[in-house]
């Protein structure tokens, strides 16, 4: 074996071996390694996916273990499987050439490795069809420290005429293990993120969506894949994967004839054949994954750290606590009512007031969800002095002001619809189908993009102190048809893709002009969270369901993929449980309220005020700390989780009773704590107590980390103590 190239750069090592005709490419993060290797015919294959080998030369031995002479073994482990030639499995890419031919072969041409920072590298590998010249570049961006990999591909047409992309996945992974367990999600409005975990059997399992405007509602593009056996929080081999695409997605899991697993993730090719002009290229979205041999907790903490450091705007910064008026008023408000609510917001101590739906429309006032969407002028009856007046009044009350918009949508009962029916996605000769009485604007049309940008831009121009945007999106795409694409003679099958690209164009433009304004990604519940949208949004709304019992589960499952700083959790009147329980549940993420403060009893108000003060103390831990899930509510009758800072000297633990039936000994066992330093001593105290309530945990007590981790800590949950929040701080804090 002879090495032609060898690069070892600080923490990350990329090994390039050219041995006879075989090229090997090693892609590594601090814990993990992926070996790609050409077979005797020059096709790129996955030879290894697992733990990083400390001696990089050992990858060579793995390479030696692969028998490329055995035709079959090289057939299924292709790194980007083409259709129409030798492949008889699910393809990652399917093309129709200019002459109508549907075959594709991809051979390795070259690769390069670019170090972006000390922590990030991009390996790009060029593959080419020897007959038609079609070129595919596979990109692997590694985040070394966080063990996260982002994969995408770029497909280039090298023919003289247009080609058609019929499938164009972002990534094609391959695993050689005995058994695979997939945890994925389903649900519907107010019932999002319901997990299902099962063993993958032979054949195909497909996760997908065809909603058009959003990835999620019924099924999110996020999953956990365990190898060998279902991983636990602290143990087992697991991959957390998610596609960064705010539209139709498709993720294929194919357990092949050798019991190996092929994973193909990308845009859903459903009704989306994409025509590519000569020399044009198509870049797919990113498939992002975090792989760990130390359980789900480690994988998700890595993903969280990556998201805060590299993906979410201001991921390491602060967030605004808020009072939203949606559940407090729905559409029924006017200027006076809103200004009265400001005082309540100030009283309990939130940072901001968020004005929700219903503030616009004159010819067709937005007094319910049947009219007005699209007409973004203040409703003169409700707000005679406009938004500007509200911003001023909020400032006077000592709080910031934010506003709700749903700019991609239109009610048929609106001036916008009357004026621009050609901007609406619909089949002109067919009956219209509505989702929440509304239709979707055609974001593939640059005029619509400009219109959407202008809605936000003019709000900011007129109200420079506007501090927050809640961007909603309640409808899916029915009757997918674009008047704009038709006029431009662009195939209708581009609509789903161009819609999402158009949305990104607008969001990028907004972000370049207003880089720091926090924005919430909302979609009639948790219908729109993905890591491409989270390039532009500081946070998301997981569900309209704010019943804390339900929220524990929804927030828990989202917590595998998204850091808590992104999860907007509001205290509302959705359910009639105690304010403390609602608040404690909301505090495990980004806290907000959606209530009429004046209707609170004096002690509830005092509790809310104290809770917001406590939240200020712990918010750095919740927003930026490492999350340890300690007791899973899917298995136990309670949930426990904890956030710990990097130095492991401060932590906050949340405990929630999840079963509603009477049980005197709900949590008789102490909860074993993970993530502290066994050598350190900690002070433990229950916080967020209701006024007049005392804690069975007593006064602040000192425990060693070892004790808390080995013996555990009993939060003493019970029918009268449905939620318990515990502060854990260094014992040295006492002497300060
Ligand atoms: C759906 C959102 O999820 C709610 O929070 C609220 O903003 C409504 N839309 C307003 O129409």
Image (spheres, rainbow, N blue to C red):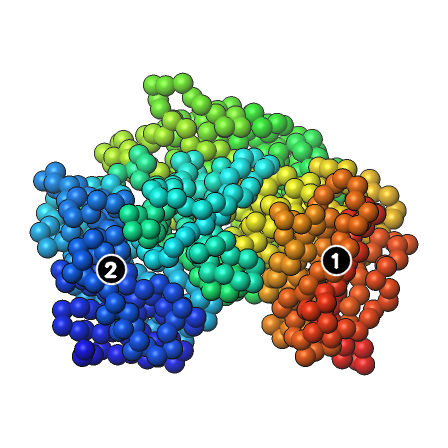
Above or below 40: residue 597: above
**Quadrant of residue 83 within the rendered picture:** top left
> Mark 1 highlights which residue?
669
Query: Above or below — where is 452 with respect to 50?
Result: above
* Quadrant (top left, top right, bottom left, bottom right) of the N terminus: bottom left
Q: Circle 1 — which element?
A: loop
Residue 45 figure quarter: bottom left
Q: Residues within 10 Å of mark 1 (few under 14, many from 20)?
A: few
Q: State the residue position of label 2.
A: 45
Q: Quadrant of the C terminus?
A: bottom right
Q: Position of residue 144 (x, y in %)?
A: 42, 70
Q: Name the mark on residue 531.
A: none
Q: Is residue 15 left or right of residue 549?
A: left
SS class of the residue under badge 2?
A: strand
Find out if the beta carbon at label 2 lies less than 8 Å from the nearest ligand 1 atom.
Answer: no
Q: Is residue 6 above or below residue 426?
A: below
Q: Is residue 317 left or right of residue 110?
A: right
Q: Residue at x 40, y 18 (%)?
A: 431
Q: Nearer the viewer, residue 53 or 725?
A: 53
Front residue of 65/452: it is 65
Residue drawn at x 81%, y 81% is: 735
Across and down, in percent, residue 171 comes to: 32, 53
Return the disc, 1 or 2, that comes first in the chain's sequence.
Answer: 2
């Amino acid at each position: 074996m002879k090495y032609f190239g060898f690069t070892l750069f600080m923490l990350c090592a990329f090994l390039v071996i050219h041995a006879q005709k075989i090229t090997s490419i090693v892609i590594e993060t601090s814990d993990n390694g992926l070996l790609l290797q050409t077979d005797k015919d020059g096709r790129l294959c996955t030879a290894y996916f697992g733990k990083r080998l400390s001696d990089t030369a050992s990858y060579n031995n793995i390479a030696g273990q692969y028998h490329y002479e055995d035709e079959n073994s090289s057939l299924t482990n292709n790194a980007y499987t083409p259709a129409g030639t030798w492949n008889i499995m699910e393809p990652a890419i399917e093309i129709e050439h200019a002459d109508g031919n549907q075959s594709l072969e991809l051979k390795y041409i070259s690769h390069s490795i670019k170090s972006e920072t000390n922590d990030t590298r991009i390996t790009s590998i060029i593959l080419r069809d020897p007959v038609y010249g079609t070129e595919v570049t596979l990109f692997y961006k590694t985040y070394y420290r966080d063990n996260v990999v982002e994969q995408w591909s770029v497909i280039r047409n090298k023919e003289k005429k247009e080609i058609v992309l019929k499938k164009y996945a972002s990534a094609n992974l391959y695993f050689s293990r005995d058994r695979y367990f997939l945890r994925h999600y389903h649900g519907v409005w107010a019932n999002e993120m319901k997990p299902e975990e099962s063993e993958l059997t032979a054949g195909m399992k497909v996760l997908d969506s065809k909603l058009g405007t959003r990835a999620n509602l019924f099924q999110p593009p996020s999953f956990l894949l365990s190898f060998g056996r279902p991983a636990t929080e602290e143990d087992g081999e697991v991959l957390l994967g998610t596609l960064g695409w705010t539209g139709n997605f498709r993720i294929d899991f194919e357990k092949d004839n050798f019991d190996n697993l092929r994973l193909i993730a990308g845009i859903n090719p459903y009704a989306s054949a994409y025509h590519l002009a000569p020399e044009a290229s198509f870049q797919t979205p990113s498939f992002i994954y975090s792989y760990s041999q130390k359980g789900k907790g480690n994988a998700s903490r890595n993903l969280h750290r990556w998201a805060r450091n590299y993906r979410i705007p201001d991921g390491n910064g602060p967030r605004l606590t808020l009072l939203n008026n949606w559940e407090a008023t729905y559409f029924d408000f006017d200027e006076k009512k809103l200004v009265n609510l400001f005082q309540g917001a100030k009283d309990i101590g939130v940072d901001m007031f968020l004005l929700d739906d219903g503030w616009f429309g004159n010819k067709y006032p937005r007094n319910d969800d049947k009219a007005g969407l699209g007409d973004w002028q203040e409703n003169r009856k409700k707000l005679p002095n406009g938004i500007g007046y509200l911003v001023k009044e909020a400032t006077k009350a000592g709080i910031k002001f934010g506003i709700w918009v749903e700019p991609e949508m239109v009610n048929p009962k609106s001036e916008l619809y009357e004026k621009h029916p050609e901007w609406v996605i619909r089949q002109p000769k067919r009956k219209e189908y509505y989702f929440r009485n509304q239709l979707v604007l055609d974001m593939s049309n640059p005029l619509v993009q400009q219109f959407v940008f202008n809605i936000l831009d003019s709000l900011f121009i007129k109200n420079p102190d506007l501090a927050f945007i809640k961007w909603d999106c309640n409808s899916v795409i029915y009757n997918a048809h674009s008047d704009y694409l038709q006029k431009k003679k662009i195939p209708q099958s581009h609509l789903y893709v161009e819609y999402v690209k158009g949305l990104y164009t607008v969001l990028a433009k907004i972000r370049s002009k207003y880089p720091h304004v926090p924005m919430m990604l909302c979609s009639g519940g948790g219908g729109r969270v993905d890591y491409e949208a989270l390039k532009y949004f500081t946070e998301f709304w997981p569900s309209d369901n704010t019943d804390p019992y339900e929220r524990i589960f929804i927030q828990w499952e989202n917590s595998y993929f998204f850091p808590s700083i992104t999860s907007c959790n509001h205290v509302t009147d959705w359910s009639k449980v105690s304010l403390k329980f609602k608040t404690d549940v909301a505090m495990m993420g980004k806290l907000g309220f959606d209530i009429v403060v004046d209707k609170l009893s004096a002690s509830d108000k005092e509790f809310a005020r104290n809770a917001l003060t406590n939240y200020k103390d712990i918010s750095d831990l919740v927003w930026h700390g490492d999350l340890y899930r300690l007791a899973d509510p899917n298995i136990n009758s309670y949930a426990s989780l904890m956030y710990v800072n990097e130095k492991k000297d401060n932590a906050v633990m949340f405990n929630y009773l999840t079963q509603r039936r009477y049980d005197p000994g709900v949590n008789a066992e102490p909860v074993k704590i993970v993530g502290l330093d066994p050598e350190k001593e900690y002070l433990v105290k229950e916080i967020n107590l209701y006024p007049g309530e005392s804690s069975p945990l007593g006064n602040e007590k000192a425990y060693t980390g070892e004790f808390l981790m080995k013996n555990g800590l009993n939060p003493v949950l019970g029918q009268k103590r449905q939620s318990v929040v515990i502060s854990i701080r260094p014992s040295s804090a006492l002497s300060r």
